[in-house]
Image: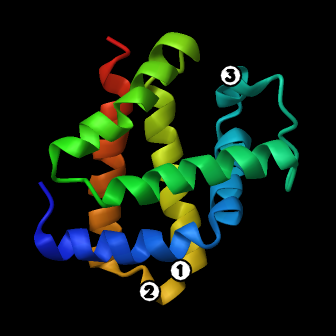
């Protein structure tokens, strides 16, 4: 699925993003909630205003989980370590898998804005593949 070079690019990228996890994650979530208002359904109990503590906290969790996942993307640990997220989102939160794809798109846009020229075609393609694999893992338990 991912070449060794793509894995290196992902680890390097997500290590950088982990340092600003709250900013990246909250901006991606805000983009999603603004562009796709129906995604707010699962978050009605939270303050979703820009820079809110809820948005920053949840955004940080997302970015750190994605950063952690890059270390194990091609190993069985990827599914083992992150499988709990799939179960949690499917059985407890009941988040529809389509929302993961929407968040992926918003995450790509946010990263591109943040990274600028450092987010070239190779990094973009690797990130898109990675986010697709991550969301497929989350959606797996929904069935």
Residue identifier under label 3: 42
Quarter of the image for the C terminus: give it: top left
Residue 34: x, y in percent? 73, 43
Q: Disc 2 to disc 1, how far (Cα)?
A: 5 Å
Viewer-side residue, 130 vs 14 = 14
Residue identifier under label 1: 115
Viewer-side residue, 132 vs 80 = 80
Q: Secondary structure at mark 3?
A: helix
Q: Look at the numbered discs 2 and 1 and tell me whether their residues touch, using CB distance below 8 Å.
A: yes
Question: Which badge, 3 or 2, is on the more N-terminal residue?
Answer: 3
Residue 74: x, y in percent? 16, 53
- Residue at 37 percent across and 38 percent down: it is 82
Question: Which badge, 3 or 1, is on the more N-terminal residue?
Answer: 3
Q: Look at the numbered discs 3 and 2 and tell me whether their residues touch, using CB distance below 8 Å.
A: no
Q: Secondary structure at mark 2?
A: helix
> Is 3 drawn above or below residue 52 in the view shown?
below
Q: Residues within 10 Å of mark 1 (few under 14, many from 20)?
A: some
> Is 57 drawn above or below residue 110 in the view shown?
above
Residue identifier under label 2: 118
> Is 80 drawn above or below residue 127 in the view shown?
above
28 relative position to 97: left or right? right
- Residue at 56 percent across and 13 percent down: it is 92
Residue 102: x, y in percent? 50, 40
- Residue at 68 percent across and 22 percent down: it is 42
Q: Look at the numbered discs 3 and 1 and tell me whether their residues touch, using CB distance below 8 Å.
A: no
In terms of image quadrants, where is residue 14? Answer: bottom left
Residue 87: x, y in percent? 42, 20
Q: Secondary structure at mark 1?
A: helix
């Amino acid at each position: 699925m991912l070449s060794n070079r793509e894995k290196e690019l992902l680890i390097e990228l997500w290590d950088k993003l982990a340092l600003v996890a709250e900013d990246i994650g909250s901006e991606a979530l805000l983009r999603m909630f603004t562009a796709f208002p129906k995604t707010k359904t699962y978050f009605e109990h939270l303050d979703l205003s820009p820079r809110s503590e809820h948005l920053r906290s949840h955004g940080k969790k997302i970015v750190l989980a994605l950063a952690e996942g890059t270390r194990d993307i091609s190993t069985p640990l990827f599914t083992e370590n992150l499988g709990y997220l799939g179960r949690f989102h499917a059985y407890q939160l009941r988040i529809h898998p389509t929302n993961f794809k929407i968040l992926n798109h918003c995450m790509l846009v946010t990263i591109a804005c943040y990274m600028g020229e450092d987010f070239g075609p190779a990094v973009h393609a690797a990130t898109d593949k990675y986010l697709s694999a991550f969301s497929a893992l989350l959606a797996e338990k929904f069935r």
